[in-house]
Image: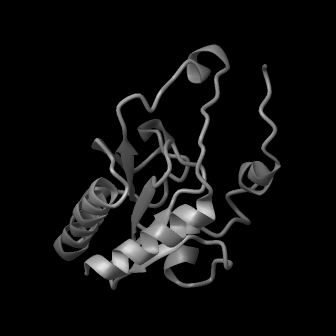
Amino acid sequence: MKHLYAPWRGTYINRTSESALCIFCAAHNKTSGEHSFVIERTAHSTVLLNIYPYNPGHLLISSARHIAELHDLTPEERADIMELSAYGSKILRTEFGADGINIGVNGGSAAAGGSIPEHFHLHVVPRWFGDTNFLPVVAGTKHLSADLHAVHTALCNAWKEKQ
């Protein structure tokens, strides 16, 4: 199979940098739609569920300010992002049973690997033994068996209970 039908990605893929509102700014400023999948907003950061996850529970933690580089964040902003990353990692391990966590930093140009290079953010990705199979190798796709709305609800509930 060479193609994976995913029509919901059309808006994201076809956006233009001039007309698109940054998803992280929209999520932090509450201008995003009802399906923004925001989990937490603080004075310095936003935690949201990645709607194109590597694994169920994949979190995005971004600075509140529209800043591209880690070194341009204040010490308070960096500390807040790290605290939220640690807390999110704990929830993914305790509530979702993740065997491990990958944390990736996207800052600066698209060469860093991020699809939104103009806004600094972290990826907090839960990992389980055996969470990869033949599909990425053979079909160039990954199977996710979790509903985003259910994962979002579970994360929000766990986030509130653990604080």
Instruction: Give the image location of residue 84, x and y in percent.
Output: 28, 68
- Camera-side residue: 49 or 161? 161
Q: Quadrant of residue 138?
A: top right
Question: Relative to 86, is 139 on the left or the right?
Answer: right
Q: Name the residue rendered at 61%, 66% in the picture.
A: 149
Question: Relative to 158, is 114 on the left or the right?
Answer: right
Question: Relative to 160, is 74 on the left or the right?
Answer: left
- Camera-side residue: 72 or 91? 91
In the displayed structure, would residue 105 be above or below residue 91? Answer: above
- Which quarter of the image is occupied by the C terminus? bottom left
- Which quarter of the image is occupied by the N terminus? top right
Instruction: Give the image location of residue 6, x and y in percent.
Output: 78, 44
Q: Is residue 106 visible?
A: no
Q: Name the residue rendered at 46%, 39% in the picture.
A: 113
Q: Name the residue rendered at 28%, 54% in the picture.
A: 93
Q: How many marks?
A: 0
Q: Is residue 8 visible?
A: yes
In the displayed structure, would residue 67 be above or below residue 141? Answer: below
Instruction: Give the image location of residue 34, x and y in percent.
Output: 67, 79
Q: Name the residue rendered at 32%, 80% in the picture.
A: 161
